[in-house]
Image (cartoon, rainbow, N blue to C red):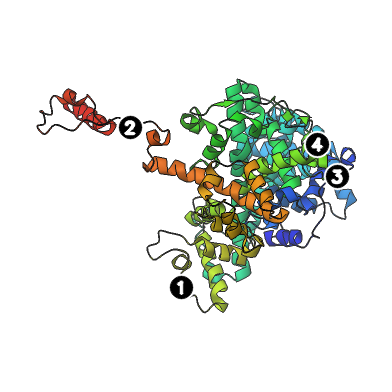
Amino acid sequence: VSSISAHIDNVAKKEKGAPAFLPDLTRQTSEQIVAKWASATKIMPEYKKYHNQIVVADEWMIHTRLRRLMTDLDKYFQGSKESKDKYQQRKFYEEQLKNLIAKAYNCDAKEAAKKRDIAASINIYNTFCSLWSKMVWRRPLLTLAVELYGKYGEADDIMSSFGTTCYLAQNCITAKRIAFNFILAAAHRSTMEAEAKENGKKTTKKEAKIDGSKMTYPEARERIYEMMEIYLDQHKEYAIKSSVLEPTKYCYEKMGQTHNRDSNDVHGYNYPAAILLSALHVQLPMIPMMGDTWPDQGFLDVWDVKGDIDKLWDLFKKPINFGRAYTGMRKDLEKLKLKGFPKSGTFKTIGSAKTPKNIANIAVDPDAKYKDVRKHIGENYIKKFAYFFSKDFFLKKCFEVLNQESLPEYYGFRSVFQRAFDEYKKDRKEIKEEKVLEWLYDEYFIEIQIDRVWELFTFLGVTKDSKRVRIIPKLGTTIQDWCKAAGVSDAKLADKLVEDGYDDLEWMLSKATHKDVVEMCEECTIGKLDQELLLDVWIEWKDQLKEKMQNDEKKGKINKTEKKGIPIPPVAKEPTKKPPSATPVQFKVNMPIKKKRIMKRVKEGAKK
């Protein structure tokens, strides 16, 4: 098993600037398409501003645990055609499969072929043989995975994995690929654990008290990389769930299409995963099936829905709802009014989604006829996914999850991170703190200083340098703030706008339309580049203003009746002589809402 550092370094060394568009798409296999899009690095202009908001380094966004383990297993066959031919043979695969089942059930090879999985209630041997027959180019990898899992896996772990694998393997080809990924990951995990024990590395919860001070910096960094690899895979899964999959499931439920809702994790996953790979060069933990021909079985262009679709996104982007299933948010979701649902399996302005590779290739097609499609993909799918990897969202969540050491895989993070901090501050005499947490938090250990977390993560090679990341500016109050946040080239532009009558930023953000802002730019002869910069900030600040008003409402700073222009009825003065508490009914007439609630509680308390 090779180191994660080696994988990351290999990706970082690749030539930059390769285009993602494939003119000969129909001649490419799914595996070739994935490989080409994973190595392409040129970002389309429509997506560049969202790509620049991502703080995670590009080499980490394309890196996944599954991608690494497939590379590791491929090394078995490099330079040895005889070895690869051996693992292509069905007879050899069947021998290894019987050994795997025999180890799990503690029986001989003859009995192993008859064993049935308890959870899926099907014959394990026949199901795995069926899986092998469908995995054409993956057969050597599957055979090797079964062999390694039988050699290094624990009996209980193998038996529990049969349930998941058998359930998936008896369904469609997409589900079979998920089953292949699952068994591959299980084999790789057991091999890594065996190698760790052989090298004396502690892996259990009890043994995982790692002393980072006794490690060299490269050793400490490698342990951090192991934890970061697991965390980033989980973060990507949560991001795709919150930005596409869970909103889609809710919309399918509202449409009454429960079958499509349940198929969303299988077929619906492939389409956004392919778009992110081609347009943003982000590899999700599960490799998408580019040739999936079932778009109507789980794929919905969810961000083309009408009604309260913006409020739907506002709910799913909250940190508390990150990665959360829509079923746990029903109370808030039922308040929304959604309408105009597109037909399942179709995409805006294109029609039938056909296959994931078709949509993903259109997303990076520079042809002018797809301009509206690229705009739709950028403003919805790319922007929403990238939001979860922005500075304000990603850094705090990532550090706090790892620092809690809530999973066995994260045990020892504090110790190795302290070792990385010791290395970082060697040439920085201005840092006086000895402990990394003292340096990262304020004096009361309440507020974390995100910029310092960013510095350390960049030093480790996990995040981009701050100069390469575009930070969304905070909401301003004047036209001067707007021009400064946009970084326009003309220093006197703000004064010019004020002179021409465009001096009310609040009106521009709350009342003006996109067309109004474009007309303002044309009237004031603002250059095309500055116009785009101003529009970008205007869109971002509109969202921030809306969010601020919603928060103010919750805090009681804005009275809803005043906001709607409804006069507030006068409240009757409280009588000087109060009646006894046993008769609170006398306060019902013209009583303020809050006081009604208090008196209701008093009455209920008296009854009890």
Tell me, yes or no, if residue 200 can be seen here. no
| 235 or 220, nearer to the observer | 235
Label located before the other in sequence (3 or 4): 3
Badge 1 vs badge 3, beta-carbon distance below 8 Å: no
How far apart in space, not on screen, are marks 4 and 2 (Cα)? 57 Å
Tell me, yes or no, if residue 375 can be seen here. yes
How far apart in space, not on screen, are marks 1 and 3 (Cα)? 53 Å
In front: mark 1 or mark 3?
A: 3
Residue for point 50% across, 46% down: 545
| Residue 386, x across and y down, in percent | 63, 48
In front: mark 2 or mark 3?
A: 2
Mark 2 sits on what residue? Answer: 568
Among all residues in the image, which is located at the extreme top?
A: 256
Q: Residue 126 carries which label?
A: none
In front: mark 4 or mark 1?
A: 4
Q: How crowded is mark 3: few (under 14 residues within 10 Å), some or many (20 or more)?
A: some
Label located before the other in sequence (4 or 1): 4
Badge 2 vs badge 3, beta-carbon distance below 8 Å: no
How far apart in space, not on screen, are marks 1 and 2 (Cα)? 59 Å
| Residue 576, x across and y down, in percent | 11, 34
Q: Quadrant of residue 243?
A: top right
Mark 3 sits on what residue? Answer: 22
Badge 4 vs badge 2, beta-carbon distance below 8 Å: no
| Helix, strand or loop at mark 2 | loop
In front: mark 4 or mark 2?
A: 2
| 22 or 203, nearer to the observer | 22
Mark 1 sits on what residue? Answer: 434
What amino acid type is highlighted by mark number 3? Leu
